Image (cartoon, rainbow, N blue to C red):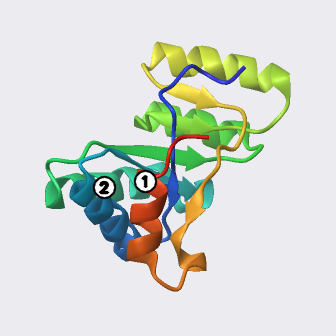
């Protein structure tokens, strides 16, 4: 039940520094970037972070993706807040309802975790982001 969205190469962000590195790498390559955050960070926080990254790198299309795990209420709240991509890995029943809500909001619901770069697991986050964003989609 994954929504049809362009191929994603999300980069997990834990704060502004991570978002800046990801957006700078995308700007250097002339590509878009998807910033992925854990739902515990909150929709407003992620949207503000994505907005800041876009203001600092206006040539980069930045998309926010909130990982809500199996928490349907959190996913519904993220959609209502305007998060364009929400990941929900819970049961099919709630996922179907959330997919309908996402469609009504012009958003997309992912039900599987896409391959993701967590730059904090790299010694050189700048190079890791550039390599991740320039590699072919799997």
Q: Quadrant of the C terminus?
A: top right
Where does residue 79 sit, x and y in percent of width and height?
50, 32
Q: Residue at x 41, y 73 (%)?
A: 127
Q: Is residue 118 above or below residue 3?
A: below
Left or right of 22, for residue 58: left
Q: Residue at x 67, y 24 (%)?
A: 2
Q: Is residue 121 above or below residue 35?
A: below
Please tell me how crowded label 2 is: few (under 14), some (14-19), or many (20+) other residues with Cα within 10 Å: many
SS for callout 2: helix
Give the numbered dot on residue 26: 2
Q: Residue furthest front?
A: 136
Q: Quadrant of the N terminus?
A: top right
User: Mark 1 near mark 2, Cβ–Cβ under 8 Å?
Assistant: yes
Task: Identify the residue position indicated by label 1 in the image.
Answer: 133
Left or right of 102, for residue 89: right
Where does residue 58 sit, x and y in percent of width and height?
14, 50
Q: Residue at x 70, y 18 (%)?
A: 97
Please tell me how crowded label 1 is: few (under 14), some (14-19), or many (20+) other residues with Cα within 10 Å: many
Where does residue 109 sit, x and y in percent of width and height?
60, 28
Where does residue 28 sit, x and y in percent of width and height?
23, 60
Q: Nearer the viewer, residue 60 or 135?
A: 135
Q: Residue furthest bottom?
A: 123
Q: Quadrant of residue 131?
A: bottom left
Q: Which comes sooner in the sequence, label 1 or label 2?
A: 2
């Amino acid at each position: 039940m994954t929504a049809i969205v362009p191929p994603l190469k999300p980069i997990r962000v834990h704060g502004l520094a991570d978002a800046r590195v990801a957006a700078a790498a995308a700007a250097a390559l002339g590509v878009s970037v998807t910033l992925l955050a854990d739902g515990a960070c909150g929709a407003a926080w992620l949207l503000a972070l994505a907005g800041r990254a876009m203001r600092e790198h206006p040539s980069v299309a930045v998309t926010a993706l909130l990982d809500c795990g199996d928490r349907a209420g959190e996913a519904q709240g993220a959609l209502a807040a305007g998060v364009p991509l929400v990941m929900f890995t819970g049961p099919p029943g709630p996922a179907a309802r959330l997919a309908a809500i996402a469609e009504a909001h012009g958003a997309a619901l992912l039900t599987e975790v896409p391959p993701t770069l967590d730059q904090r697991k790299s010694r050189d986050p700048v190079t890791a982001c550039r390599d991740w964003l320039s590699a072919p989609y799997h």
